[in-house]
Amino acid sequence: MIRLASYLSLCFYSLFMLSACGSQGDTAFDVSREADTTWLVKILKEKYSEYRDTRYFLKWFDLNGDGESEAIVYIIGPVICGSGGCNTLVFDKSSGEYKQIAELTVTQPPILASEDLVNGWSVLVSQSYGGGAVAGYSEYTFRGKAYPNNASQIIGVMPRGTILIPEISFFKEGVALFKN
């Protein structure tokens, strides 16, 4: 009976110590993500420097199962979007730094990562209507090194997946890229 009590005490103590370690790991992750976001905002400011009313929506999500989250950025503003939608950018971290692997044109939220994989990457899906497009959902499939700028195909029903950028009502819901 004493051995059982000692064993249970040891198990409880071990779980307690492990839970403390987990919270330290989360803090380190948050600091790293903050640095990544700061870097990303710098890149976006360079790219959209002429468009002071630009806003963005950002989601970190692992699209290829490598344990490293990619940055999915929906860019919106009164000058940079057309009647069919706005651009969505995807950045992948490889070799320690991020590089842009997609600039999906004419996308509209919701934007999701489908449960389907092509070449080991999630199929990206955005709502599609306006600008002469047939209403439905645009699919973007990974092509080895990048996603194509234009949809791979239009489908009629939203597939199952994880919503990365939810539907929005007004562009000012996004984070201001520049402080006017």
Image (cartoon, helix red, strand yellow):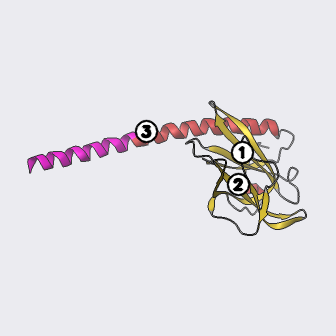
Q: Which residue is mark 1?
A: 90
What residue is drawn where x is 8% and y is 51%?
1
Image position, residue 94 (x, y; %): 64, 34
Q: Which residue is mark 2?
A: 124
Q: Looking at the picture, which amino acid does disc 1 mark? A: Val
Outermost left residue: 1
Q: Are marks 1 and 3 in contact (CB under 8 Å)?
A: no
Determine whether the residue tagged by mark 2 lies in a helix, strand or loop: strand
Looking at the rendering, which quadrant does residue 124 occupy? bottom right
- Magenta residues span 1-21
Q: How many marks?
A: 3
What residue is drawn where x is 50% and y is 36%?
28
Tell which tag, 1 or 2, sits nearer the viewer: 2
Horizontally, is 20 left or right of 161 in the view?
left
Horizontally, is 20 left or right of 180 in the view?
left
Q: Looking at the picture, which amino acid does disc 3 mark? A: Gln
Horizontally, is 117 left or right of 74 in the view?
left
In depth, the one of 89 and 75 nearer the eye is: 89
Residue 152 seen in the figure: yes
Q: Which residue is mark 3?
A: 24
